[in-house]
Image (spheres, rainbow, N blue to C red):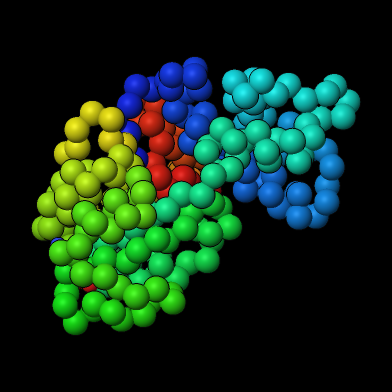
Amino acid sequence: MATGRTHRPATRSRGIPEATVARLPLYLRALTALSERSVPTVSSEELAAAAGVNSAKLRKDFSYLGSYGTRGVGYDVEYLVYQISRELGLTQDWPVVIVGIGNLGAALANYGGFASRGFRVAALIDADPAMTGRQVAGIAVQHSDGLEKIISDNGVSIGVITTPPGVAQQVCDRLVAAGVTSILNFAPTVLSVPDGVDVRKVDLSIELQILAFHEQRKAGEEAAAGTDGGAPAVAARGESASADKGPDGDVPAVMPA
Ligand SMILES: NC(=O)c1ccc[n+]([C@@H]2O[C@H](COP(=O)([O-])OP(=O)(O)OC[C@H]3O[C@@H](n4cnc5c(N)ncnc54)[C@H](O)[C@@H]3O)[C@@H](O)[C@H]2O)c1
């Protein structure tokens, strides 16, 4: 399965594989929690457990950042937070537009977590004239007629699409023509974009379907264990851990926890 898809090679120009890039936010979330508790250093095993990643994989990922930790001491939490933030481009402010301010768009606009991670909601755009001027999360919704000007005035390179699926491609085309080069798509549709434009797709129903698959498998194994004396349901968890990667190593925008 591949709910997340980027139109870039599996390895970035600076030599960091996409799968590593996709794990960096997990490390950052765990490190930020440690930093908030003023924990100065962390071992690879502790950090791997907190991030839900295998520790050998973590050490390999950090070697791409040039971070090897100190034997017996571990990694410096503050420095790693800085290194990962810099690698992810979070040391700068990213203006983001959300297009389609219905249930989902309004919920995203109201989510406070973007700002603390370096993303500023620069504009909310909707095609419904009745929405124009309405305040959502303290921001006045603007009509989609002005989309191109809004993008250029705000220097926006990241667009979030939360429109109905039937118009998502058309919205995407306009965003790209206006200069947007990264799109986070929530509409259940596959978007076509030119080279150089990254698309990440979030589809919670796909994630739920994958969980349903594992639930079904676990139930089957429990039933089998009841008859053959009890092999533990390890296989299902092993599958689950590897289900976060597509065949070309890409990772869904919503990572399995
Ligand atoms: N990825 C997920 O997990 C997930 C979860 C829920 C909903 N969705 C999808 O997100 C989308 C939005 O869902 P919702 O419940 O918020 O719908 P909604 O009907 O409440 O909102 C859609 C909004 O888009 C606006 N719109 C329509 N055409 C537009 C256009 N051309 N340009 C700009 N705005 C336009 C509408 O005026 C409306 O305000 C749907 O595609 C839905 O399937 C995805």
**Dividing the picture into quarters, in which one does residue 154 lie?**
bottom left
Q: Most extreme residue toward the right, as rendered? A: 72
Evaluate whether residue 5 shows in this view. no
Q: Which residue corresponds to the image point at 47% horizontal and 23% vertical from the top-left? A: 17
Q: Which residue is drawn at 74% across and 31% down?
A: 44
The structure residue drawn at horizontal position 46% and vertical position 49%, both measured from the top left corner, is 94
Q: In this view, does 211 lie to the left or right of 143?
A: right
Quarter of the image with the N terminus is top left
At 31% across and 81% down in the image, what residue appears? 134
Left or right position of 184 against 37: left
Residue 195 picture quarter? top left
Between 156 and 159, the one lying in front of the other is 156
- The front one of 248 and 109 is 109
- Residue 222 drawn at (x, y percent): 49, 48
In the rendered image, residue 179, in percent from the top left (x then y), is placed at 26, 43
Question: Residue 68: image x %, image y %?
Answer: 73, 21
Q: Is residue 80 left or right of residue 71?
A: left
Q: Relative to 53, does residue 257 appear above or below in the rendering?
A: below
Extreme front residue here?
153
Q: Position of residue 79 (x, y in %)?
A: 74, 36
